[in-house]
Image (cartoon, rainbow, N blue to C red):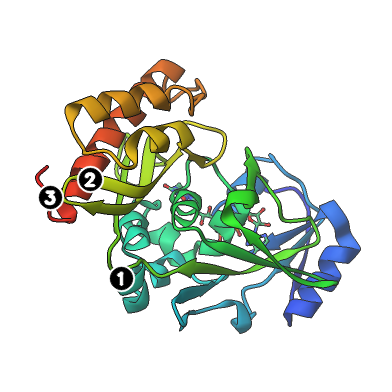
Amino acid sequence: MKAPKFSYTRATSVEHALELLDKHGDEGRILAGGQSLMPTLNMRLSQPEMLIDINGLNDLKGISLDGDTVCIGALTRHVEVMNSDIVTEHLPLIAEAMPHVAHVAIRNRGTIGGSVALADPAAEMPACILALGATLVVQGSAGKREIPAEEFFHGLYETARAENELLVQIRIPSQKADKVSVFLELARRHGDFAIAGIAAYGSVSGDTVNDMRLVYFASEDKPTIGTNAIAALNGKTWSDETKEAVNTALEGDLEPMTNLHGSAAMKLHLQKVLTGRAMDAAVARAGGAA
Ligand SMILES: Cc1cc2nc3c(=O)[nH]c(=O)nc-3n(C[C@H](O)[C@H](O)[C@H](O)COP(=O)(O)OP(=O)(O)OC[C@H]3O[C@@H](n4cnc5c(N)ncnc54)[C@H](O)[C@@H]3O)c2cc1C
């Protein structure tokens, strides 16, 4: 199918993009990498009247360090995040997850900001930045505001970003030296959207798990912190008994969606399996016994 008719403007500055967003309201749509937006237009799942192309806005590109915080411009392409030395050194969770984001051609155009703004429940980046306690910087004509990742993802493709705001930057605390991270997902083929997935970040001393944060994606309508599972895990030695307790607790955290990729029961089972594997890996990476 072909896209419906739309007008197109290439924004010349962030302020220009914001003016256009204010002017067109919910009929205006930001065009970043276009890897999700263009397919939805071609399938006529959305019909905005104005596409606001931000690809010329260099202020929104790049990765830098601000003290202990990694700052990633919203328009930074997935491939740039994947090849960044700063990300490899300071955000190993993101470095581990990025090869799972789609395929090379899509990573060459798609942007981290587009992925986070879209909030596809099966996307890897929203789960990772939630696990790492990131802050999203959005800008509207009234100025900038910062939104903790925990408050950003509201539901299926729904976020705390207002329609007339641009996501401009993602600020992610560097991984601390005493912490360990693990990213795992299950997809039918490498590069497909996941059916189940987990981003784990915390510390393990000996076999004892502390401050571990478990974030689940793909099975829920948004990236979801496993609050009960975390409570059953932290302060415990990682053992078969703990694994069972965590898995039972996880049933109170997740309400998987049944869809073409599988039933709710199957996805809950997969998330339990991934939790066990993630914690085995976390203990091993921290130098423990598993
Ligand atoms: C075949 C295929 C497989 C894929 N597999 C995966 C996968 O496994 N994992 C995964 O995570 N993704 C996957 N994707 C999606 C891909 O990662 C997209 O690049 C990403 O979701 C959107 O980024 P984009 O820059 O292309 O955004 P666009 O398509 O340009 O925009 C997406 C949406 O976000 C809005 N938007 C974009 N940038 C901003 C901004 N800065 N501020 C406010 N709103 C903004 C747009 O208005 C639009 O509504 C896949 C895509 C395809 C086509």
Query: Residue 236: x and y, percent?
Result: 27, 38
Q: Amino acid at mark 2?
A: Thr
The quadrant of the image that shows the C terminus is top left
Q: Amino acid at mark 3?
A: Gly
Tell me the residue that label 1 is attached to.
88
Q: Residues within 10 Å of mark 1 (few under 14, many from 20)?
A: some
Query: Residue 246: x and y, percent?
Result: 33, 29
Tell me the residue that label 3 is attached to.
288
Where ligand 1 lies, by quadrant?
A: bottom right
User: With respect to residue 140, does 231 lie above or below?
Assistant: above
* Mark 3 element type: loop
Residue 286 visible in the current orientation = yes
* Mark 2 element type: strand
Q: Residue at x 33, y 63 (%)?
A: 95
Tell me the residue that label 2 is attached to.
208
Q: CA distance from mark 1 to mark 2?
A: 26 Å
Query: Residue 51: x and y, percent?
Result: 74, 62
* Mark 1 element type: helix
User: With respect to residue 195, does 107 lie above or below?
Assistant: below
Residue 111 visible in the current orientation = no
Q: Nearer the viewer, residue 1 or 267?
A: 267
Q: Quadrant of residue 74?
A: bottom right
Pointer 1 or 3: first along the chain: 1
Count numbered badges in the picture.
3
